[in-house]
Image (cartoon, rainbow, N blue to C red):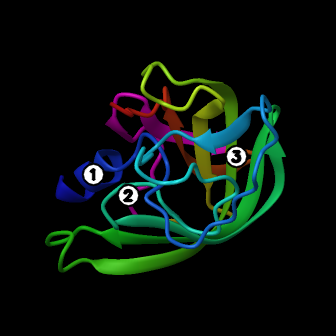
Amino acid sequence: MIRLLALPAAALAVFGASALATAEPQAGTPVFAIGKCYDPDKTVLTQPATFDYNCDGTGVLQDMVWATWGPDGARGTGTDSSVECQPNCAQGTRLVNPVVVHAWNPQPAKDAACPADVRYFGDLTIAYPQGVPPWITPGAQWSPGTDFVTIDGLPAVHFSGLSPMCG
């Protein structure tokens, strides 16, 4: 049960970030970012090399390389470093698996305190082409908007309804 709570607890937006790549946008040009774990006190992250999708260190995408990033969505590959929270997250085993990440459905934040020129991807999937954490199983749902899906035949987690809180 604790394992199942760890993924969703940090599962609806995507960044607590470490290493990242950012570009200075031209005035009036929308910037695209993943809304999960957004920190309004930091620069908006675009095409991050690393980000904490659980907002607590139990699920971190790292070594991300983005093939696409823009108004039509984002697609990248990298490594998922996640903790199997058994017997608890502090003592759990860290599992490392290659991943394919998709983000889409960019939209302005619902929170007026968020930057107006940023469009946050409202949906995100993390798919596992080789090896999968044991809690990623058909029918699993960790929290509303976070559930198991299959993408191109691969087991995956879909985060939907992502939107940052900036106020």
- Expressed as whole percent of the image width and height from the top left, the position of residue 102 reads 70, 46
User: Marks 3 and 2: in contact by CB < 8 Å?
Assistant: no
Specify few, some or many for label 3: CA neighbours under 10 Å numbering under 14, 14-19, or 20 or more: many
- Expressed as whole percent of the image width and height from the top left, the position of residue 46 reads 67, 52
Q: Quadrant of residue 165?
A: top left
Specify few, some or many for label 1: CA neighbours under 10 Å numbering under 14, 14-19, or 20 or more: some
Q: Residue at x 62, y 67 (%)?
A: 20
For the residue marked with disc 2, what is the amino acid? Trp
Q: Is residue 146 magenta?
A: yes
Q: Residue at x 63, y 33 (%)?
A: 118
- In magenta, the rendered stretch is 133-150
* Dot label at residue 102: 3
Which residue lies under the disc numbered 2? 135
Q: Nearer the N terminus, badge 3 or badge 1?
A: 1
Query: Closer to the camera, 3 or 35?
Result: 35
Q: Secondary structure at mark 1?
A: helix
Query: Which one is closest to the eye, mark 2 or mark 3?
Result: 3
For the residue marked with disc 3, what is the amino acid? His
Q: Is residue 68 magenta?
A: no
Which residue lies under the disc numbered 1? 4
